[in-house]
Amino acid sequence: MSDFVLRGGYPRLYDVDVPSEAYYENYIATYVERDASGYVNPRNLSMFRNFIAACAANCSNLLNLTGLANDVGISVHTARSWLSLLESSYVVFQLQPYHANLRKRLTKTPKLYFYDTGLLCHLLRIQTREQLLSSMQRGAIYEDLVIVETIKRHQNAGRQPRLFFYRDDSKIEVDLVDITDSSRPELAEIKSSATFRPSFTRHLSHVGELLHIGNESQSVVMNAEETTVVGNRKIWSMRDWLMRN
């Protein structure tokens, strides 16, 4: 799984034996210099590239445009414009928070993700399995993987994805609320760990009760070798989760 995370899913990487580092460096250069140059002032192209890297550093976090703007030294207006450009180019996307008429104050801020973990790892300068496993960003990268591949799974099956995350004012959070099939909504917590801990299901229980989603539709997706069941919840290996229909 770590090899796929590092290499990413761009077909060209598998059609031709191209080193990932060279491919992504060329991809960024081509995108910045050719595709984005029509929308970004040529004098700001280096800052635009820094902005992409700043987005990578904040992947899987709540979107903070002011923070991104400050990191790069641009205005919030410019940060918003550049983020829109990255979204329209299918480089990044925003996952919206779940909203419902609950007796809870829910966050209204989306989270930021990349469409490809290979590009994400390249921007974070993670090139090897050892670097990935020791990285402070490991959890964010694996969370990105599961979210984006769930989107692709639904799209490949001809379904319109309806994915959200849950977070309330008590900072109780579940990484994925999937209501693509409204008759069978699902909750999933995403962990980079290979070892299951009962604490992984703590927020699932609370949010499942609030949203009336039973244990059988609550999952933990982990970097484990195999899929198991604990307490009527499925504990998925990431590989099995990604291979679902």
Image: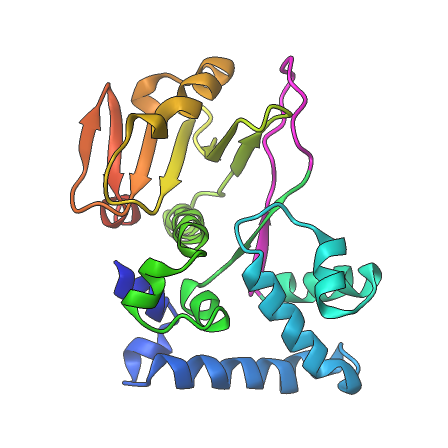
Asked whether residue 245 appears in the rendered view, the answer is: no
- Which residues fall within the magenta stretch? 90-108
Residue 38, compared with residue 92, is above or below; it is below
What residue is drawn where x is 40% and y is 55%? 138
Colouring convention used in this rendered image of the protein: rainbow
Residue 157 drawn at (x, y percent): 36, 47
Residue 206 drawn at (x, y percent): 46, 17
> Which quadrant of the structure image shows residue 79?
bottom right
Residue 6, compared with residue 193, is above or below; it is below
Residue 107, compared with residue 20, is above or below; it is above
Residue 150 drawn at (x, y percent): 40, 46
What residue is drawn where x is 44% and y is 24%? 203
What residue is drawn where x is 31% and y is 71%? 128
Image quadrant for the N terminus? Answer: bottom left
Left/right placement of residue 102 relative to residue 82 reads: left
> Which quadrant of the structure image shows residue 10?
bottom left
